[in-house]
Image (spheres, helix red, strand yellow):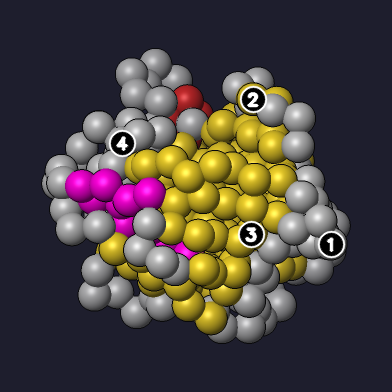
Amino acid sequence: MSLESTNTLYKATRTDVSQNQGKFRTHFNFPGRNLPDHDDHGYGPLATVVESFMDPDTLIRMHQHRNEEIISWVPTGVMRHDDGEGNKLVTDAEHMMVMNAGSGFWHEERTLADDPPLRMLQIFVRPHSLDLEPDIQHVSIPDPVEGEWRHLFGPEGSAAPLFVRNEVHFYDTHLEAGDRIDVPTEPGWDTYFYVFDGAVTAGDMTFEEAESGLLVEGTTTVTAREDSLLVAFEINPDAPITRQGTIGR
């Protein structure tokens, strides 16, 4: 994909903040680090975007999250979720999950021996208030339409099928080489995007797999250099936030 920017666009290369636990590997992307001299690893309510890999037959044992919204977006593989409320949920390319952890939510994740390798994003959003009521959402998501943005979560009351308790919208799009599309924007908000597969350019910058851009106000157009999968977040940088999440502080 190529991005043509008419506004201020800040690039971050592939993160060097990673954890390797053998069959479970994570790469932590911090959207605030796109912006020079920014004193917060997060950007407004968007705290962290974690690219996670799980091999077949892997268990992440029961653990608790508090005071964060955890979104599981799984384009490749299968993520199996059990929790302290008795839910047994499967998240894959056709389903998406949001844990509104609030005052506390216990869960575990696993893959079975005959599951395919898992590659996913776990997105951590800072809620607007501490110790909210815990909840979980798990839904079938609309089929993607090539060359269009798919709106997957937003603030409570938005048109998206899932919600988080702060001012962030999330979209994904599949683009074929040569396709052009405008990055989603909202007046007064900024947009962070992440290249999950493929390669993009913006103005005189190229964004390859696992690289990201932060568009501060304004608009920009993306054009695919090769077949690509891109996600984007509209963020209100002035939204009230909390900073006491288990991971996404």
Please report whichever mark, 1 or 4, sits nearer to the chain's N-terminal start: 1
Q: Where is 145 relative to 11, above or below? A: below
Please report whichever mark, 1 or 3, sits nearer to the chain's N-terminal start: 3
Residue interval drawn in magenta: 97-106
Q: Is the residue under label 1 in contact with that under label 2 (CB below 8 Å)?
A: no
* 58 vs 239, nearest the viewer: 58
**Which residue does the image show at 16% across and 46% down from the upper left?**
131
Is 104 colored magenta in this rendering? yes
Residue at label 1? 114
Residue at label 4? 245
**Res. 79 mark:** 3
Q: Position of residue 53 (x, y in %)?
A: 71, 43
Query: In which quadrant of the rendered image does the C terminus lie?
Result: top left
Left or right: 65 in relation to 228: left
- Quick one: SS at disc 4? loop
CA distance for labels 2 and 1:
24 Å
Please report whichever mark, 4 or 2, sits nearer to the chain's N-terminal start: 2
**Which residue does the image show at 64% across and 25% down from the upper left?**
19
Q: Position of residue 82 (x, y in %)?
A: 50, 60
Mark toward the viewer: 2 or 3: 3
Please report whichever mark, 2 or 3, sits nearer to the chain's N-terminal start: 2
